Image: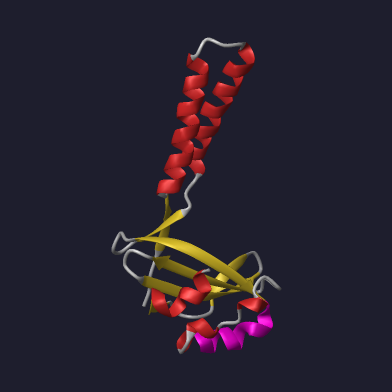
Amino acid sequence: MEKTFTRVRSIKDITIFSTLIILGCVLVAIPTGAGINIAGFFMIFAGIILALLLRTGYKDAETGERFILKEYYFQQAMNAAISSALESKPASIDLGEADKGNALKLDIYYSKVSGKAYMQLFEYIPYRYEPCSRMYEYEIAKVQKLLK
């Protein structure tokens, strides 16, 4: 199964930059000192920059469904254990070993709306992560332990 996920703006992103722009406009519009107006212009500028750059959501390129990404990093020694767990029982992955290295990256794309989760293991090859497993699809209930 080949899934492609693209980065998109989430509701949280839109709320953040909209709030900054609106508050900045309010600070500029009210008749106060120059310091408050400068802060307002800074907030507007920051909101515009965030509107251009901030994309924390993910969308399935095929179906258009929105997902959230959860990432875990592991040592290279965990490759066999994680690969076998992905094939049979993903909830058995030991999160106690997470963040002790960065040779492996486990991506979990999940959607609470549809109840689907997609998992894939990547291996660090200098300057980028390359897939070292196929994309696995599970019900979100089977991987709930990994999403906390």
Give the prevailing secondary structure in the magenta stretch.
Answer: helix
Q: Tell me the residue at 48%/40% (across/down).
A: 16
Task: Report whether 24 appears left or right of 125.
Answer: left
Image quarter for residue 139? bottom left
Instruction: Name above or below for residue 1 compared with residue 128.
Output: below
Q: Is residue 139 magenta?
A: no
Image quarter for residue 113? bottom left
In the rendered image, residue 143, in percent from the top left (x then y), is placed at 46, 77
Residue positioned most to the left: 63
Asked if one can make out residue 120 in the rendered structure from this viewpoint, the answer is no
Instruction: Name above or below for residue 84 compared with residue 43.
Output: below
Q: Quadrant of the N terminus?
A: bottom left
In the rendered image, residue 136, in percent from the top left (x then y), is placed at 42, 79
Q: Tell me the residue at 38%/70% (across/down).
A: 3
Asked if one can make out residue 34 in the rendered structure from this viewpoint, the answer is yes
Task: Report whether 76 appears left or right of 83.
Answer: right
Q: Which residues are magenta?
A: 75-85
